[in-house]
Protein backbone atom coordinates (compact mmCIF):
# COMPACT_ATOMS: atom_id res chain seq x y z
CA UNK A 1 0.00 0.00 0.00
CA UNK A 2 1.14 3.47 -0.79
CA UNK A 3 1.92 5.61 2.19
CA UNK A 4 -0.04 8.83 2.24
CA UNK A 5 2.36 11.69 2.86
CA UNK A 6 1.22 14.35 5.25
CA UNK A 7 1.01 16.90 2.46
CA UNK A 8 -1.43 14.59 0.73
CA UNK A 9 -3.98 15.58 3.32
CA UNK A 10 -3.74 19.24 2.31
CA UNK A 11 -6.13 20.11 -0.47
CA UNK A 12 -4.86 23.59 -1.34
CA UNK A 13 -1.79 23.50 -3.66
CA UNK A 14 -0.54 26.78 -2.12
CA UNK A 15 -0.48 25.24 1.33
CA UNK A 16 1.38 22.24 -0.03
CA UNK A 17 4.03 24.54 -1.53
CA UNK A 18 4.38 26.35 1.84
CA UNK A 19 4.70 22.96 3.51
CA UNK A 20 7.42 21.93 1.04
CA UNK A 21 9.37 25.17 1.48
CA UNK A 22 9.31 25.02 5.26
CA UNK A 23 10.92 21.61 5.03
CA UNK A 24 13.43 22.39 2.29
CA UNK A 25 17.08 23.32 2.75
CA UNK A 26 18.62 26.44 1.23
CA UNK A 27 21.85 25.55 -0.62
CA UNK A 28 23.31 28.56 -2.36
CA UNK A 29 20.51 29.86 -4.56
CA UNK A 30 18.74 26.53 -4.54
CA UNK A 31 15.98 25.35 -2.24
CA UNK A 32 16.36 21.62 -1.92
CA UNK A 33 13.39 19.49 -1.02
CA UNK A 34 13.86 16.50 1.25
CA UNK A 35 11.23 14.57 -0.58
CA UNK A 36 12.62 12.02 -2.92
CA UNK A 37 12.21 8.80 -4.67
CA UNK A 38 14.52 6.39 -6.39
CA UNK A 39 13.95 7.61 -9.93
CA UNK A 40 12.89 10.84 -11.54
CA UNK A 41 11.70 13.98 -9.85
CA UNK A 42 10.57 14.26 -6.23
CA UNK A 43 6.81 14.09 -6.01
CA UNK A 44 4.19 14.72 -3.39
CA UNK A 45 0.46 14.38 -3.17
CA UNK A 46 -2.11 17.14 -3.29
CA UNK A 47 -5.53 15.99 -2.22
CA UNK A 48 -4.37 12.45 -2.83
CA UNK A 49 -3.01 13.09 -6.33
CA UNK A 50 0.69 12.77 -7.12
CA UNK A 51 2.46 15.86 -8.41
CA UNK A 52 6.09 16.38 -9.26
CA UNK A 53 7.11 19.09 -6.82
CA UNK A 54 8.80 21.40 -9.33
CA UNK A 55 5.68 21.43 -11.48
CA UNK A 56 3.55 22.10 -8.44
CA UNK A 57 5.76 25.01 -7.31
CA UNK A 58 5.78 26.46 -10.81
CA UNK A 59 2.02 26.21 -11.12
CA UNK A 60 1.37 27.84 -7.75
CA UNK A 61 3.97 30.61 -8.04
CA UNK A 62 4.06 31.36 -11.74
CA UNK A 63 0.79 30.06 -13.09
CA UNK A 64 -0.44 27.13 -15.13
CA UNK A 65 2.11 25.47 -17.39
CA UNK A 66 1.26 26.26 -21.02
CA UNK A 67 0.01 23.32 -22.97
CA UNK A 68 2.75 21.24 -24.50
CA UNK A 69 5.51 22.85 -22.42
CA UNK A 70 7.55 21.28 -19.66
CA UNK A 71 9.00 22.76 -16.47
CA UNK A 72 12.80 22.78 -16.56
CA UNK A 73 15.43 23.61 -13.93
CA UNK A 74 17.92 26.33 -14.85
CA UNK A 75 20.15 24.98 -12.04
CA UNK A 76 19.81 21.40 -13.29
CA UNK A 77 19.02 20.19 -9.79
CA UNK A 78 15.87 18.13 -9.92
CA UNK A 79 15.37 18.42 -6.16
CA UNK A 80 15.37 22.22 -6.31
CA UNK A 81 12.02 23.94 -5.68
CA UNK A 82 13.22 27.54 -5.98
CA UNK A 83 10.65 29.14 -8.28
CA UNK A 84 13.30 31.47 -9.76
CA UNK A 85 15.12 28.41 -11.09
CA UNK A 86 12.11 26.97 -12.82
CA UNK A 87 11.19 27.85 -16.35
CA UNK A 88 8.98 26.39 -18.99
CA UNK A 89 10.61 24.97 -22.05
CA UNK A 90 9.61 23.08 -25.08
CA UNK A 91 9.32 19.37 -25.20
CA UNK A 92 12.42 19.40 -27.41
CA UNK A 93 14.42 21.23 -24.69
CA UNK A 94 13.15 18.82 -22.13
CA UNK A 95 13.93 15.78 -24.21
CA UNK A 96 17.44 17.10 -24.70
CA UNK A 97 17.77 17.59 -20.94
CA UNK A 98 16.18 14.25 -20.17
CA UNK A 99 18.39 12.44 -22.66
CA UNK A 100 21.34 13.75 -20.66
CA UNK A 101 19.95 12.51 -17.36
CA UNK A 102 17.91 9.45 -17.99
CA UNK A 103 15.90 7.90 -20.73
CA UNK A 104 12.72 9.86 -21.11
CA UNK A 105 9.26 9.25 -20.04
CA UNK A 106 6.28 10.99 -21.44
CA UNK A 107 5.52 14.35 -19.89
CA UNK A 108 2.31 14.68 -21.88
CA UNK A 109 0.59 12.68 -19.18
CA UNK A 110 1.57 15.32 -16.62
CA UNK A 111 0.29 18.12 -18.80
CA UNK A 112 -2.94 16.24 -19.17
CA UNK A 113 -3.19 15.81 -15.39
CA UNK A 114 -2.50 19.49 -14.92
CA UNK A 115 -5.23 20.56 -17.31
CA UNK A 116 -7.70 18.35 -15.51
CA UNK A 117 -6.55 19.85 -12.24
CA UNK A 118 -7.09 23.47 -13.22
CA UNK A 119 -10.31 22.73 -14.99
CA UNK A 120 -11.72 21.26 -11.81
CA UNK A 121 -10.63 24.12 -9.51
ZN1 LIG B 1 17.99 25.65 -8.02
Image (cartoon, rainbow, N blue to C red):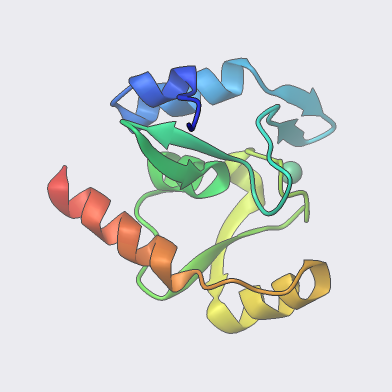
Residue 73 screen position, x and y as percent: 68, 56
For the residue pair 104 and 76, the one nearer the viewer reads as 104
Left or right: where 39 falls relative to 88? right
Q: Residue furthest front?
A: 1
Where does ligand 1 appear, by image quarter?
top right
Residue 6 screen position, x and y as percent: 46, 17
Question: Residue sitting at 49 percent across and 50 percent down?
Answer: 55
Is residue 80 depicted above or below 25 in this figure? Answer: below
Q: Residue furthest bottom?
A: 92
Question: Residue sitting at 43 percent across and 72 percent down?
Answer: 108
Question: Residue sitting at 23 percent across and 56 percent down?
Answer: 116
Image quadrant of residue 83? top right
Residue 78 screen position, x and y as percent: 71, 49
Image quadrant of residue 9? top left
For the residue pair 27 and 79, the one nearer the viewer reads as 79
Q: How many marks?
A: 0
Is residue 19 depicted above or below 116 in this figure? Answer: above
Left or right: where 18 falls relative to 15? right
Question: Residue sitting at 63 percent across and 38 percent down?
Answer: 81
Q: Residue furthest left?
A: 120
Q: Where the C terminus falls, by quadrant?
A: top left
Residue 19 screen position, x and y as percent: 50, 19
Is residue 70 depicted above or below 76 in this figure? Answer: below
Amino acid sequence: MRKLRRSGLIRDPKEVVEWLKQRATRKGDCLITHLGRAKGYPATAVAGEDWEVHRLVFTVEKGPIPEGLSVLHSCDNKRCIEAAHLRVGTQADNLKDMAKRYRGRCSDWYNYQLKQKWRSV
